[in-house]
Amino acid sequence: MGVTYITLVYVLNLLLNVCPGSLSSMAVPSSDTDAVLITVDQSGQGDYRTIQKAIDSVASNNSELIYISIKPGTYREKISVPVDKPYITLSGTDANTTIITWNDGGDIFDSPTVSVMASDFIARYLTIQNTFGTSGKGIALRVSADRAAFYGCRILSYQDTLLDDSGRHYYNSCYIEGATDFICGNAASLFDGCHLHSLSKNFGTITAQHRNSPLENTGFTFVGCKITGLVGGTVLGRPWGPYSRVIFAQTLMSDTVSPEGWLDWDDPNKQRTVYYGEYKCYGPGADRSKRVGWSRELSRDECAPFVNKSMIGGRSWLRSTPTHFKKQMPRPIGFSGIGQK
């Protein structure tokens, strides 16, 4: 990437994370209980046969809650939720039977199976998978939007599985699998009751958090999670950015977690600036007697600001499933979504 692009990304991330929502001018839905219902069914019994066509049918600068119900099946699609289509929910009924899969590798911004660019996005009970394999970066899910939440999802790849890029995010009861830096990016994210599974046989890394400045209110917090994998196969994280911040609290760590716990990515200078903390974790991988000296065993007071939804301002934007649904209104003739299944 060129210097100009990197500078622009840094400034945008800083604005989004210091003043989340400051760049958003989207209208707010008038109701959080009513939603437009769109169904996706490969058999042709729904409104659309593909998930992307359903997303494309949503009006730009949408100001209604949109609930896209996806029937069970394996959807071989590369999906993008564009920045001008907020308030979309993609929902299956069982992540094991509703699968979105693609096979692509290389550039982390181009390869994702699913890219979320729009704010106020929700995904429920979906498997999101990139089958690129072990030969390089293959992102399953990219989240480059503020206020995004994922419930009961399975996110699967090998390297850089989840590009948790920017914005405030919430992951609840999700299963995330990979080997190298498989949760990476510079978002402010709370992982609540998630299962992290390492595929690495040796020297794997769960996180690569990219916080670049102490002014950025970003970082990954894992609360009540579970870590599994092969014995001694992974560390908890390494610093993509010099001020990388990751906290594990009350998390079950199997013996897949190496005794040292953390790496400095061959840059000892980062040992002075990263913030890597653990609080009341348990299991054989939680033994801190051989941890690197620059990681922290947090007190209750030190941990408190990071372990609830206040960290991501979630009480103001996390929403429950709508209780009333209406069918999508027909679009004007000539609109690209009309009649396209």
Image: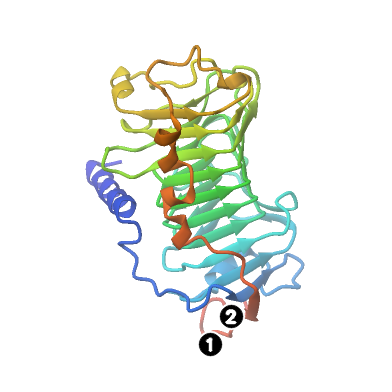
Q: Earlier in the sequence, mark 1 or mark 2?
A: 1
Local packing at callout 2 (Cα closer than 10 Å; few below 14, some 14-19, many 20+) is some
Which three-letter amino acid code belongs to the residue tagged 2?
Ile
* Residue ID for mark 2: 338
Q: Label 2's element?
A: loop
Up-down: is 52 above or below 101?
Answer: below
* Residue ID for mark 1: 333
- Rendering coords of residue 107 (x, y %): 44, 41
Quarter holding the N terminus? top left
Quarter holding the C terminus? bottom right
Which three-letter amino acid code belongs to the residue tagged 1?
Ile
**Residue depicted at x 47% and y 43%:** 163
| Left or right: where 326 falls relative to 45 | left
Q: Is residue 233 visible?
A: no
- Rendering coords of residue 268 (x, y %): 31, 17
| Left or right: where 137 falls relative to 326 | left
Q: Label 1's element?
A: loop
- Of 293 and 94, the residue lying toward us: 293
Up-down: is 67 above or below 306?
Answer: below
- Rendering coords of residue 79 (x, y %): 55, 57
Q: How far apart in space, not on screen, are marks 1 and 2 (Cα)?
A: 7 Å
- Rendering coords of residue 85 (x, y %): 46, 68
Local packing at callout 1 (Cα closer than 10 Å; few below 14, some 14-19, many 20+) is few
Up-down: is 115 above or below 303?
Answer: below
Checking the image for residue 213, the label placed there is none
**Residue depicted at x 37% and y 30%:** 275
**Residue depicted at x 46% and y 56%:** 314
| Left or right: where 147 falls relative to 131 | left
- Of 58 and 214, the residue lying toward us: 214
Asked whether the residues under the numbered discs 1 and 2 touch, taking CB atoms below 8 Å apart as contact, a structural biologist would say yes
